[in-house]
Amino acid sequence: MKKQAELYSGKAKTVYATDDPNQLIMHFRNDTSAFDGEKVAQLERKGMVNNKFNAFIMQKLEAGGVPTHFEKLMTEDESLFKKLDMLPVECVVRNISAGSLCRRLGIEEGMDLEPPTFEFFLKNDQLHDPMINDSHILTFKWATQDEIAQMKALTFKVNDILKALFADAGMLLVDYKVEFGRYQGSLLLGDEFSPDGCRLWDAETRKKLDKDRFRQGLGDVVEAYEEVAHRLGVNLEPIPDNI
Ligand code: 5GP
């Protein structure tokens, strides 16, 4: 599979066409950003860690019955994916209060949320990804009623699978963001799942092991991502040439 023209470069990933019109190569870069691109940095090894972490999680989700766009690892920091027609919305599930939920609702961090909450946000950096609801999605035709139902069901299925996976490795899945896209008549999980787009706390100490370390200037960002990967059993060793 050959990498062709660059199609899109986001804040942390670059997407390339391939010689197959239905497949893409995604390059996970070391660039890290927060606050809609206001805070940026280069973090050594982050691209490699997130590429392998994402591959591991996508395979777990696929095995648990969540259809994803992941095809295979290509290089240390690149993977092959199905080319989706992405829906312009983010789906967020929260098991413990943190982040924008606390700011918006005046709730203190660390409350168990039972049942977990579900929120939609519009993907729009200029507008700072505003929160939206089903009605906005239908009116502005960002997705159909059936796709809304599927996004909710699949995002909660991701929660069931990953909450257990992280719990077994001594971590709490606090919250996460996922995105979906259309592929040949089906809705598939797209984008990535990595510590850049979720909150993970050590179950005992509640030490933050995710991108909040970068957002809040806590340091040892990639070291925390590597710790999460090691606890889960993600192989971060160099990929052999004959893959
Ligand atoms: P919050 O709404 O509290 O800022 O974020 C909720 C969860 O979704 C967090 O785990 C956060 O990392 C993730 N999230 C929300 N928006 C984005 C985004 O634009 N990019 C990434 N990578 N993650 C996001």
Image (spheres, rainbow, N blue to C red):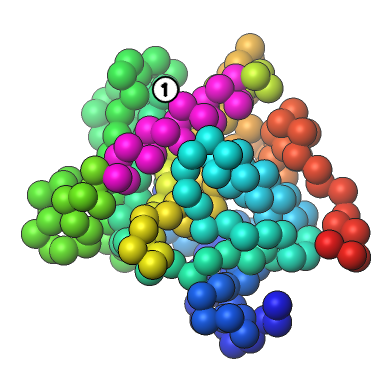
Please name the residue that numbered disc 1 is placed on.
96
Q: Is residue 237 above or below residue 210?
A: below
User: With respect to residue 174, does 70 lie above or below?
Assistant: below
In the displayed orientation, state which residue is furthest to the right.
241
Please state the extent of the stretch shown in magenta in the rendering: 150-167
Type of secondary structure dominating the magenta stretch: helix
Q: Position of residue 71 (x, y in %)?
A: 62, 60
In percent of width and height, residue 87 lies at 32, 61
Q: Quadrant of the C terminus?
A: bottom right
- Residue drawn 41% across the image and 24% down it: 95
Q: Is residue 163 magenta?
A: yes
Q: Residue at x 72, y 59 (%)?
A: 73
Residue drawn at (68%, 59%), measured in percent from left and top? 72
Horizontal placement of 37 versus 116: left or right?
Answer: right
Q: Nearer the viewer, residue 13 or 65?
A: 65
**Picture quarter with the N terminus:** bottom right
Callout 1: few (<14), some (14-19), or many (20+) C-alpha neighbours within 10 Å? many
Whole-percent x and y of residue 233?
A: 77, 33
In which image quadrant can residue 214 be found?
top right
Say which of 112 and 115 sits in front.
115
Ligand 1 sits in quadrant: top left
Could you tell whether 47 is left or right of 203 in the image? right
Image: 154 above or below 85: above
**What is the count of numbered marks?**
1
Is residue 117 one of those drawn in magenta? no
Q: How far across and how far down the image is residue 90, in percent?
A: 35, 51
